[in-house]
Amino acid sequence: MKRIGIVAKRNRPEALEALKELAHWLDSRGLEVFVEEGVARVTGLRGLNPEGFRKEVDLIVVLGGDGTMLAAARMVAGAPVPILGVNLGGLGFLTVIPRDELYPAMERVLRGNFEVERRMTLKAVLTSPEPKEYTVLNDVVINKGALARMITLRAEVDGQYLTTFRADGLIISTPTGSTAYCLAAGGPIVHPSLPAIIIVPICPHTLTNRPLLVPEGSKIGVTLSSEGEEVYLTLDGQVGLRLPQEAKVEITKAPGEVLLVKSPFRAYFELLRTKLRWGGDLPAPRGGEGEPCS
């Protein structure tokens, strides 16, 4: 590896500090360092446009949280560029390397001693009024606006009628996204290697509308049947637009994958246990025997 791209939020001092430190570390080892054009104007480092990140770097290091990782993943989806996520944010299911493990992990990666996971992405096509296409790593969400009213969504799978959801919205997720909004809405945790797409209604009126897994090759069609409601299409929680009446969204597996560098220090299930605090010790009771806990 000779050319390293770094992605970080330019409005986060902690991320810029980590970026400059990493850039100096890489430069001292004779490697070329590139950042996004907006960050280049702030730091004085060499900038690259999104196409340059797709074609001209050997590795991308993301400094931030899962939101920064999602933006980077969409930028290079389908390109054979591995992404190493370093967690400077909160929960971080995608940014699996803590800050204090950054340089030990980088040493391994630069020696070629690393593995990647191939994460599937979804393609969402808004078919009307004019076709628009989007790629996501986590999820496609159709949800209502500010008013507390349910919306009506007609769903099909491979051209076969599934059901009409009366709900606050609908999530169509990859296995990678199963630990994001999907999980908060009551969806299952799905191992990222499983070839499946997850459909999760958000607060459905019919309580028997449960999360559903379909094969990764499925074509999911969702038509907005509500009239006069504000309804939005949100992509990875970062890109959004208002849907016109009777809009139809078609979701399929995208042709490109995202290559995520696996943590060299812990496996997937250890990450789950750590992030979700599974199996931790119960706190000791505050009161003594026979005393109230206040």
Image (cartoon, rainbow, N blue to C red):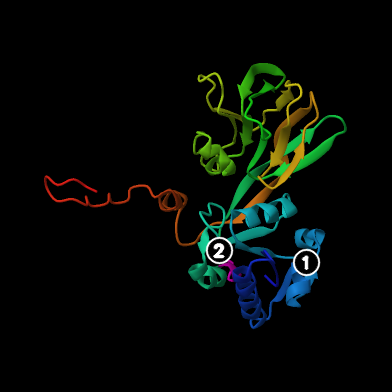
**Crowd class of label 2 (few under 14; some 14 to 19; many from 20; radius 10 Å):** many
Q: Which residues are magenta?
A: 109-113
Q: Vertically, is 154 above or below 105? A: above
Which disc is residue 38 wearing?
A: 1
Which disc is residue 88 wearing?
A: 2
Residue plotted at (64% across, 26% down) = 149
Q: Position of residue 204 (x, y in %)?
A: 56, 24
Residue plotted at (69% across, 48% down) = 238
Which disc is residue 174 wearing?
A: none
Q: Amino acid at mark 1?
A: Gly
Q: Secondary structure at mark 2?
A: loop
Q: Nearer the viewer, residue 225 or 179?
A: 225
Q: Nearer the viewer, residue 287 or 215?
A: 287
Q: Is residue 79 visible?
A: no
Q: Amino acid at mark 2?
A: Leu
- Tell me which secondary structure the magenta stretch mostly adopts: loop
Q: Nearer the viewer, residue 117 or 171?
A: 171
Judge left or right: residue 264 versus residue 1.
left
Judge left or right: residue 185 versus residue 79.
left
Q: Vertically, is 240 above or below 286? A: above
Residue plotted at (80% across, 25% down) = 245
The quadrant in which the N terminus is found is bottom right
Q: Position of residue 54 (x, y in %)?
A: 76, 58
**Earlier sequence position, callout 1 versus callout 2:** 1
Q: Position of residue 270 (x, y in %)?
A: 42, 52
**Which residue is outermost to the right?**
130
Q: Position of residue 103 (x, y in %)?
A: 54, 73
Q: Nearer the viewer, residue 33 or 16?
A: 16
